[in-house]
Amino acid sequence: MSKKRYNCRPFWVRLGRECTLLAMCVYFMAFAPVWAQQDLQPRQLVEAPTAGLLPSRGLGLDLRFYGDDGILGGVSVGLFSRGMVGVSFGGSDLLGNEEIKLNPRIEFSGRVRVIEEGYTIPALAVGYTSQGYGMFDDELKRYIRKSKGIYVVASKNFRLPLGHTGFHVGANRSFEDGDDDSDFTGYIGVDTGLGKYVVAVAEYDFGLNDNSDNSLGSGKGFLNAGIRWTLSEAFALEFDLKNIFRNGMQNPHPDRELRIAYFGKF
């Protein structure tokens, strides 16, 4: 005759084990990295590039409306799973009755992801972009906000109860050095979901390459933030507040910009 076996472990031991298993399930279901979900990885915050990419045969269109009736348009294409390229062009005074001032050239960009994101490691990408932001200064041969030039950036994404959150750290060297300030610099940024359709983004550029005697910046760095609304699977609308620290003598107030983004496939 077999004897019935009872669990003789103390109640607090069994409770602790069950709570541990429950906590592990909550972590993997709600807080695990979302490294495999490309749609949760923005390719750009406000100005700062991330390690996110367009999927293969993905198409991204971007329109920015900024001060002095300026418009900047860009097209990006996902060439393969780890690489994308893009072109952009714009100008100021495109609306109204002032003389139109086009940017001096078409700008180019490209990005390659060299390390995919995992549970413990961030994605790592290297890239180049010659596109700066704001009006082009003919005397200094630069945009009001310098292009990133060549850069390397690491991005790590997590899933939280309200939505995903991504952290980004980058270093770059701009080739817009007509102001005799060619220092390496860097940036940090974050994007976080506020529900299903809204994403908040913020970034801080250290501005180490824009603080010399001939530069437009004054050494405070550049803080930008924005709110992005996903209107559909293809369209997003974003409002950005840029240069919140009012870095530079030519910036008495933060810049307000509107951005429209489209995503599709070909």
Image (spheres, rainbow, N blue to C red):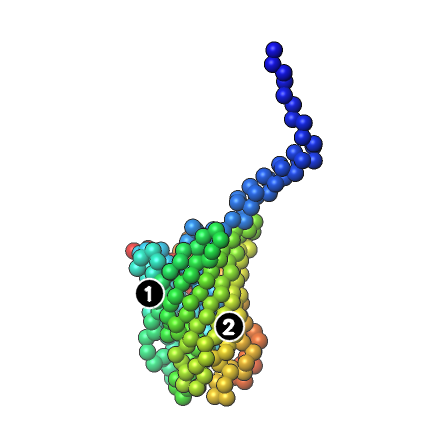
User: Residue at the location (34% across, 81% down)?
Assistant: 104
- Sooner in the amino-acid sequence: mark 2 or mark 1: 1
Q: Which residue is mark 2?
A: 205
* Image quarter of the N terminus: top right
Residue 151 is situated, as x and y percent measured from the top left of the image, at 41, 70
User: Residue at the location (43% across, 86% down)?
Assistant: 180
Any part of residue 232 in sight:
no
Q: Disc 2 to disc 1, how far (Cα)?
A: 23 Å
Question: Between residues 64 and 47, which one lies in front from this camera angle?
Answer: 47
Q: Quadrant of residue 82?
A: bottom left
Residue 106 is situated, as x and y percent measured from the top left of the image, at 32, 75
Q: Quadrant of residue 14?
A: top right
The amino acid marked with disc number 2 is: Asp
The amino acid marked with disc number 1 is: Val
Question: Between residues 96 and 153, which one lies in front from this camera angle?
Answer: 153
* Image quarter of the C terminus: bottom left
User: Residue at the location (38% across, 82% down)?
Assistant: 101
Residue 211 is situated, as x and y percent measured from the top left of the image, at 51, 83
Q: Which residue is mark 1?
A: 85
Labels 2 and 1 touching (C-beta < 8 A): no
How many circles with numbers are drawn on the protein?
A: 2
Eyeballing the image, is 114 above or below 133?
A: above
In the image, is 56 to the left or to the right of 185? left
Any part of residue 33 in sight:
yes
User: Residue at the location (41% across, 55% down)?
Assistant: 116
